[in-house]
Each structure stands twice: as structure tokens, then as C-alpha cells.
Amino acid sequence: MFEGIYTALATPFTPQGRIDFAALEILLEKQIASGIDGLVLLGTTAEAATLDEAEKDELLCAAMKQINKRVKVIIGTGTNCTRTMLQNTQAALKHNPDGVLIVTPYYNKPNPSGLIEHYRQAAQLGAPIVLYHIPGRTGLKLPPQVLADLLTKVPQIKAVKESDYDMAQVTDTAVKFSKKIDYLCGNDDLFPQYLAVNASGIISAAANVLAPAFVKMYSAWQKGNTQKTFELFSKAYPLIKACYTETNPTCVKYLLSLLGIGGETVRLPLGPVSDEHKAKIDEIFAKTDKSLLI
């Protein structure tokens, strides 16, 4: 259901901090032209936590109209409050997405019974769910047995975006579940490793800048050319790492500004990238094969 390259889209802002719809239009067209399979709107990279409800709806109206079913769309609706998550999901479903991305609740550290009920209530709204597992941001590491219970009791969960860096657990989870659901890589810098454990694709923040690189990697992998996949990954790897020099999406937005797509403005509590880090990113960007960039 969810296979291939999905870009976790950034939200361009004007220098005054408003949504830059002109830049959004350019970014969307460049993404689709790159051959991606889908887009994730209102995820972490979109700075969704800093958008109010009216802004979210305005962004979704504009983006969905422009995308016009040319690629699949997943909308992020997760929060650490089940009631708010349900409200977000209901609002998202008005735009007819292909699925919703729901992060495991952060800060609260829900116990298994609460976590299952959180997703069960989301499932009752009818949309396919992509469960987002990112322990580094949420503080909640999902044991394989709890994931097994979730998939049994909430069959509306059709995919997992896995952003754990514990490759031992990732491997264990992939072996057990990747033939039952779509298992999506959430760590750009580990994409080949995830492909090797049967990942069906990736949801990538770096693809805002490097969509052609990820599309080419996945295409080579599908053709059985693992060496070509690694060659492409090796060329893109320095800039992939550069995207995370500071907290995502600060560096992604700086790189987009170098490409002439919107500015580097982020919303507090995120701040601008330091001049020292900009200089390092500039150096890597200058050396990157431009055919790998949007």
C-alpha cells in the first residue's frame, strides 16, 4: 500500500513567518517531477507542531489541490493527546488522504493498554494508519511484542515508519512484521540497511533536497542492482548527513534556500542554523552531484 519514496515535506515560510504558498507550489512540483511515490504533509519536517488549525487546513487545501492525486498523500495527525489526535485526524480526512501518520504519543510514555486504545480509536475513523515509531523524539521504545499486539488488535495499521537506530531491534521487527505490513525506513542515513531487511520504502526529510537520489537508489534496488544502490547512496550520503547537522528541518530549509526554493525561516522554538554549520553545509552542497538534487 505504501511503497517507494515518500518525502516528508517541509513547510516554506516567508521571512515574516507566514506560509509561503508560492514556494510550496514550486517545491511540490519539483518533488513530483523527481518521481517520488508520495508525500507526507504535516509531519515533523513540516513543523506541524507550530501551525495552528487554520494554517493546517489552508496548507492542506492548497497542497491537495495542486497534487491532484498524482502521488499518494499521508497526513500527519499524531499528538500526545488522544482527543487532539482524533480531532486532527477528522480534519485531515476531509482532504481524502491515502493514509494518516500517527506517532506513538510522546512525553506521556503510554503503557501498552493505553497505546492500543489510542490507535484503536484512530482506526475507528476509517483511514489507513502509518504508525510512526521514533524513540529518540518520543521517549517511547516500542517492544516487538507490543507492536505485535497492536497489529493484531488494530488491523487498520497498514504500515510502520521505523526511525529507531537500534538495528538489532529493527532487524527483529522487520523479520517478524515486514511481510504483514509496509515497513518504511524513517532514517535517511540507514536507507540501504533498511532495504536489506525488507523495507518497502522510506519517508525521508532529506528527500526535500535529494528526492532524485532516493528515487534512483530505490529503482536500482528494485532491479537487483545493490552495488548501484550503494554507489548512489555513497554520493548522496555527505549531504544526507548535512541535513541533520542541526535539528530537522533547519538544515533542510537552509539547503532549499540554496536551491532557490523559499527561505530558511523556521518557527520558534527552532532557530536559524549557525554560521559555522552553514559554511560546512555550503562546502558539502558545492561538491554534491547536482543530478541528485531536485
Image: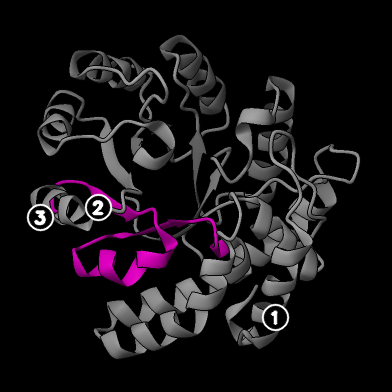
> For the residues carrying marks 1 and 3, which lies nearer the camera in this image?
1
Q: Secondary structure at mark 2?
A: loop
* Residue at numbered disc 1: 283
Q: Which residues are magenta?
A: 179-207
Of pointers 2 and 1, the one earlier in the residue sequence: 2
* Residue at numbered disc 2: 166
Q: Is residue 55 magenta?
A: no
Quarter of the image with the C terminus is bottom right
Q: Residue 221, position in %: x, y?
A: 30, 78
Dot 3, how many residues are within 10 Å of its Cα: few (below 14), some (14-19), or many (20+)?
A: few
Q: Secondary structure at mark 3?
A: helix
Q: Is residue 285 above or below residue 43?
A: below
> For the residues carrying marks 3 and 2, which lies nearer the camera in this image?
2
Tell me if residue 144 can be seen: yes
Q: Is residue 194 magenta?
A: yes
Q: Is residue 41 above or below residue 95?
A: below
Q: CA distance from mark 1 to mark 3?
A: 39 Å
